[in-house]
Every structure is written in structure tokens, then in C-alpha cells.
Image: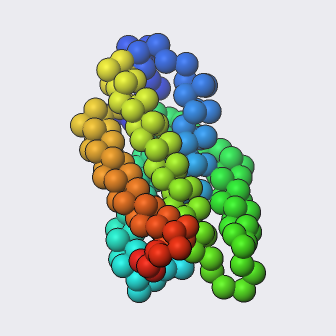
Amino acid sequence: MNRSRTPGPEDTGGLDTRLLGIYLNDHLAGATAGAERAGSLVRSVRGSALGRALGPVAAEIREDRAALLGIMRDLNVPVRRAKVGAGWAAEKVGRLKTNGRLVRRSPLTTVVELEALRLAVEGKAAGWRTLRRLATADRRLDPGRLDTLLERARRQQDTVEEWRIRAVDTALRANGTDTA
């Protein structure tokens, strides 16, 4: 594929490239926040079963962000740095919630962080599904690559949900045991 030429209507399937650029930059902001959230959670539970389970997921989430950047390059969509910065900042602000404890980490913090991570992965999967649908009309999108990314997002959702349920049992049940 020659990336140096300007895509014509036969390549883009008549897509509104301006709106597609906004859409992909919104997803990039979300991917930035999701990668930050996953990394932070893994660092905070390092050495635990949860940390070992989520370490590979966090690495994949970083890879997925890089894949999105590659797709944006393939589509000649410029990165809007302000939007990416806003995603990064929003994730940092989201960490300020104390969840009932000021000095130590609350078990509820893990629940909330896993729920935020689950939402981020679900949003990413929706973006992959959208791009997969557009791939039928836009030859610059690789359907096989998008199918792979979508399947990986499904596996990530399963892992995060399994550990979210465990964290709920630990945090909110009187007889829960610590899984993190």
C-alpha cells in the first residue's frame, strides 16, 4: 500500500474524513487514559495475583493504543495532541477519589479501577467494531488486523471482569477474602 498518495473516493468508500478524524482522536484520548489506568492499577497491586493477571492485559492495552496510532497514520488522520493530553489528565484526576480511606488503599479502589478499566476496554472494542465495519468500504483498513484487535479486546474484557467480580467479593462482602 502506497501511503504517500492522497486517498481518493475509491479508497475511502466516501467516508467523512473530518468526522472520522474526530472519532479516532476521541478514541486515542480514551486509549491514552485506559493505558494509564491499566499501568497504574498493575503498579498498585504489583506482586499479587491480580497484578500477575493484569500485567499482560496492561501490556496489550499499550499495544492496542500503538495499533490505533498506526491505523490513524494509514488513514492520514493527524493526532490532536490537546485531546490526547486531556485523556491523560482526566485519568490522573480520576485517581484523586479516596474511596473511604485517606492513608491506605481501599479495597473499593480496586473495584472502581477495574470498572473503569472494563469501560475503557469496552469502548476500545466498540471502536474496533466501527473500524471493522468501515473496512468493507475503505481499502486502507485491514479487516484481519481489526478482527485480531477485536478478539483481543474480548479476552481483555473477560480477564478484567473475572477480577472485578473477585474484587467486589473482597471489598463489599463481610466474609470476602483478599484476592489482590
Quadrant location, the N terminus: top left
Left/right of residue 63 with respect to residue 35 in the rendered view:
left
Quadrant location, the C terminus: bottom left
Residue 124 x %, y %: 46, 44
Count of numbered circles on the image:
0
Looking at the image, is 85 positioned above or below residue 72? Answer: below
Residue 3 x %, y %: 39, 36
Location of residue 163 (image quadrant): bottom left
Residue 147 x %, y %: 28, 38
Camera-side residue of 64 and 34: 34
Q: Residue at (32%, 38%) from the top-left corner?
A: 146
Camera-side residue of 174 and 140: 174
Left/right of residue 132 with respect to residue 25 in the rendered view:
left
Location of residue 149 (image quadrant): top left
Regarding residue 119, the answer to whether it shows in the image is yes
Regarding residue 180, the answer to whether it shows in the image is no
Q: Residue at (62%, 76%) from the top-left corner?
A: 106
Q: Residue at (37%, 60%) from the top-left corner?
A: 162
